[in-house]
Image (cartoon, rainbow, N blue to C red):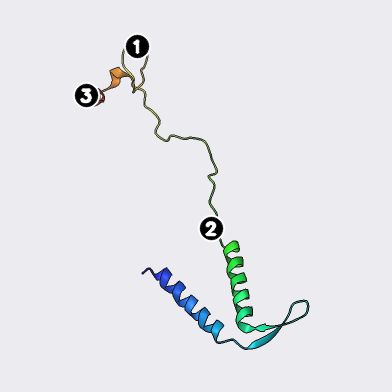
Amino acid sequence: MRPKTIIIAILLAIVVIILFNNKEESTFWFFGEIRTSKLILLAVFYVLGMITGGILFRRRKKHPKEYAVTNPNTPTIATTDTDTPTSSPYAPTALSDEDREFIRRD
């Protein structure tokens, strides 16, 4: 078992022990006198605290600041000493024999 699972199990066991050791009747003021078990009061406030903590401390997805497509690998242009125009490195004449053989297999 992972440590996180063990810690959660121990905390839940402690909560259950505390809840069931407080069964006596209690009065609660909420716009009037409410007489109820401490078990119910503690359980309600525990659940409210869990929901509030989940809302406040949830992980939010980070949105990228830039949505443009970027390519850090800029193509290199082969230069020749002759007066011919420069060609793309992806042109068939710029391929090596090994690359041509690989393409022929497709």
Q: Amino acid at mark 1?
A: Thr
* Distance of label 3 from label 1 (alpha carbons): 26 Å
Residue at image location 60% in from the left, 62% down from the top: 55
Q: Position of residue 59 (x, y in %)?
A: 53, 58
Q: Which residue is mark 3?
A: 101
Q: Position of residue 86 (x, y in %)?
A: 36, 17
**Pointers 3 and 1 in contact (CB under 8 A)?**
no
Q: Secondary structure at mark 2?
A: loop
Name the N-terminal-most of marks 2 and 3: 2
Name the N-terminal-most of marks 3 and 1: 1
Q: Position of residue 75 (x, y in %)?
A: 38, 28
Name the N-terminal-most of marks 2 and 1: 2
Q: Which residue is mark 1?
A: 84
Q: Nearer the viewer, mark 2 or mark 1?
A: 2
Quadrant of the snapshot with the N terminus: bottom left
Q: Nearer the viewer, mark 3 or mark 1?
A: 3
Is residue 26 positioned above or below 49 on the image?
Answer: below
Q: Which residue is mark 2?
A: 59
Residue at image location 60% in from the left, 82% down from the top: 39
**Pointers 2 and 3 in contact (CB under 8 A)?**
no
Q: Residue furthest bottom?
A: 24
Mark 3 is surrounded, within 10 Å at the Cα level, by few (under 14), some (14 to 19) or many (20 or more) other residues, namely few
Quadrant of the snapshot with the C terminus: top left
Q: Amino acid at mark 2?
A: Arg
